[in-house]
Amino acid sequence: MSAFLDAARPETFQAGTSRFRPAIHFTARDTWLNDPNGLVFHDGLYHLFYQNNPYGNVWGNMSWGHATSHDLLHWTEHPVAIACDETADIYSGSVVVDHGNTSGFGTADAPALVAIYTSAYKAASEHRGRQAQCLAHSTDAGMTWQKYDRNPVLTRDSAHFRDPKVFRYQGDHGACWVMVAVEAQHQKVVFYRSEDLKSWDFLSDFGPANADAGEWECPDLFPLAVDGDPDNIKWVLIVNVNPGAVAGGSGGQYFIGHFDGARFLPDAGSLVAPAGLASLPDPQAGAAALQQCLWLDWGRDCYASVSFSNTPDDRRIIIGWMNNWDYANELPTAPWRSSMTLAREVRLTAVNGSARLIQQPVLADPCAGEELPTARDQMNAGTFELRNSTLRLPDPVPGSAQVIEAEILAGSAERFDFRLFGSSDGSEGTILSYNTTSAHLTLDRRQSGNTCFHGKFASAESAPVDLEKGVLKLLIVVDHCSVEVFAQGGKTVLTDLIFPETENPENWLSAVGGSATILKLAVSSLT
Ligand code: FRU
């Protein structure tokens, strides 16, 4: 073990203090991170493990970093939980609370936390070149971990078998553990079952289907009631894809269907290309079909989203990695690099008769049930009209995130634009624009500040968004280096990183080519 890992490290950093360091998004203090791993709620704490390079701020030496939070907004970083060694890197996976002590790692009274992760074996291992699934357990509430001495517990002699997400499945004939993992280069999700987390039996596989231009990674599978109706349960299968997502590079798609304990059966309505887009003969048809797939996020920077296990009240909360493999290693931040998205609660709602995911950022303390616990109101305006005019909104507050809630009745305006983190001369800014003719919402970061650190960074992302009774509802969270947009109650989400350069950023809202009625405009800052 390295001196670095053994060295006593301060456990917290001051959020929002260094340039671009977000206030309410998790970053590691001075190292690299990618995928969220092992998201679990236990004993009043949310645990976020994550792909971490303990030795630097680019990808490598993959280990599981660790942070905890009471409210999913403020995080405390802890020492590395599961470290790589000379035989294997520790890739993505999940954590379960083994309440029934099926694994024997804990006791019935004091259940162990069990991590199921991928070992990416190195030359020094007899499993060299393979990826296989392994266990580690913790009997001190997630603070220290022991690798199982009989690892790996599941191998397919494959070099690309990874990212196990394990959950407890309750079927007609009893309960068992189900693992959802991927054969990444075959664009397949593979399903296994187990009684004790140690011995696994193959059930079935799913894929390729829909977006399949890149590797399939970090799957998740969970049931949700459509519009809260317990008699209408659908299963959501999340499949992250890199590259080949709708905005380019990495992104998360999902399928809606049924899981019968052995197989995932997608609803016909969630299958745009049942054998995968790559099987379509016409590339143009492929590009149109890509837009029809179900996307967790239409922006550039939301990848590897997976959900917490063991959450109170059966809430389904996901976190993604706020980055894109296209340029991830080159983001202009130091000493840390990369952050997570906000935690987002997901639900299913019927849209034109089909179940679709909606996402809401968790901005309230779920335990206290409070709204925006550390928020300060900057503006709260009622109904007024904007006619071919521009309104200055409250400025971003250094060290705080900003939450903007808007409800806009479209009227005759051709567009309404938010210019976020803009310079006073208008040359810089991130533009969130709704076009009433094309019914598309676009997040444009081409003039957002520093975009030149990578050729693929400057971009504009669009998603189809229908007005509802003529109204567009937006919830926008801006936090130093990111913009997350939740449109129409979270039916459509766009997440982009930005690296503003202006010293005194300003926010503006304009109605272009006509008038729009602002029904609600609330701005608050959040630390
Ligand atoms: C996704 C991913 C996973 C893998 C991990 C390695 O971003 O490629 O498939 O387990 O990152 O860091």
Image (cartoon, grey):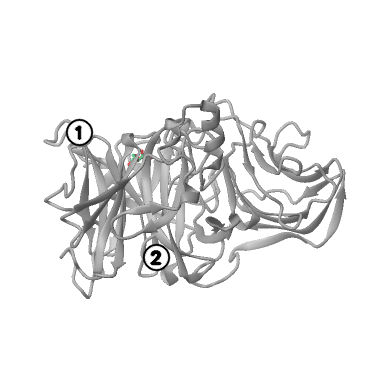
Q: At which x and y percent is residue 343?
A: 49, 56
Q: At which x and y percent is residue 491?
A: 59, 54
123 is higher (above) or lower (below) than 497? above
Q: Tell me the residue at 85%/50% (across/down).
A: 386
Circle 2 residue? 45
Circle 1 residue? 122
152 is higher (above) or lower (below) than 346? above
- Residue type for callout 2: Leu
448 is higher (above) or lower (below) than 369? above
Q: Is residue 20 left or right of residue 96?
A: right
Quarter holding residue 215: top left
Q: Tell me the residue at 34%/48% (across/down).
A: 65
- Residue type for callout 1: Lys
Q: Is residue 201 left or right of residue 62?
A: left
Q: At which x and y percent is residue 208?
A: 37, 39
Dot 1 alpha-carbon crowd within 10 angstroms: few under 14, some 14 to 19, many 20 or more? some
